[in-house]
Amino acid sequence: MLARPHTYFDLTDTLNVELGATWFGVPQHDQRDLYGVDLTLRHQPGTSGNYQGFVLGSEWYWNDQRSAVVDNTTGAVIGHLRPERKGGYSYLEAFFDRRYSAGARFDYSESPANLPQLRHGRDLARTGSVFVTWMPSEFQRLRFQIDTSWGDQPTNQRYTLQWTAFIGSHSHGFAQR
């Protein structure tokens, strides 16, 4: 089952906010409930000058899961685990000259698995990212992104060059509101 209410408010002529919530439930054997909240703030000053506005967004989720503990020799259920995990992200993207944008993002997550080797940790991962985007047309996007991850695992960096092509009929999302 899934529930997703959300709403939208104009704060000024150029500033608006979206607020939402999510609930996803799996009511069978290993019961699982996932809860979330999200907030997006947009500034769209118009088309004059190089500055085209920004988007600030954030989502946060909580996972509440009930899992059976099974005896490996008999196959019998000997108990239940109820790990609770959380995670989310926040980002800021600024738009320039209608075809360019730059931004930053921070992610935080805890693994939903409750593994015995994690007795003193929550398998924590954090990632900080910066990116620049160029849209040569309304049907293409090219993005370069640098990610740095740290937490319970060794720190690492990733460099990504992403090309996105939009094919067929599509809407421009927020511009249609």
Image (cartoon, rainbow, N blue to C red):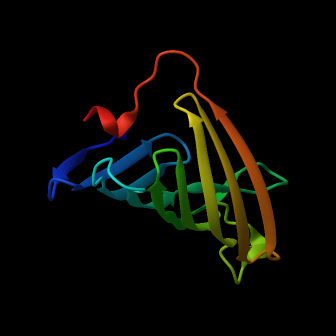
Which part of the image, by quadrant, shows the N terminus?
A: top left
Q: Is residue 152 left or right of residue 48?
A: right
Decide which of 26, 126 is in the foreground and name it.
Answer: 126
Measuring 69% from the left and 80% from the top, which residue is drawn there? Answer: 121
**Could you tell me residue 62's position as x and y percent?**
45, 62
**Could you tell me residue 149's position as x and y percent?**
72, 71
Residue, far bottom: 120
Measuring 60% from the left and 50% from the top, which residue is drawn there? Answer: 133
Q: Quadrant of residue 174?
A: top left
Q: Is residue 177 left or right of residue 121?
A: left
Residue, far top: 168
Measuring 15% from the left and 59% from the top, which residue is drawn there? Answer: 11
Which part of the image, by quadrant, shows the C terminus?
A: top left
Report the label total: 0
**Could you tell me residue 3's position as x and y percent?**
32, 41
Measuring 71% from the left and 44% from the top, which residue is drawn there? Answer: 162
- Any part of residue 60 in sight: yes
**Could you tell me residue 52's position as x and y percent?**
38, 53
Decide which of 91, 23 is in the foreground and name it.
Answer: 91
- Any part of residue 82 in sight: no
Residue, far front: 49
Decide which of 15, 109 is in the foreground and name it.
Answer: 15
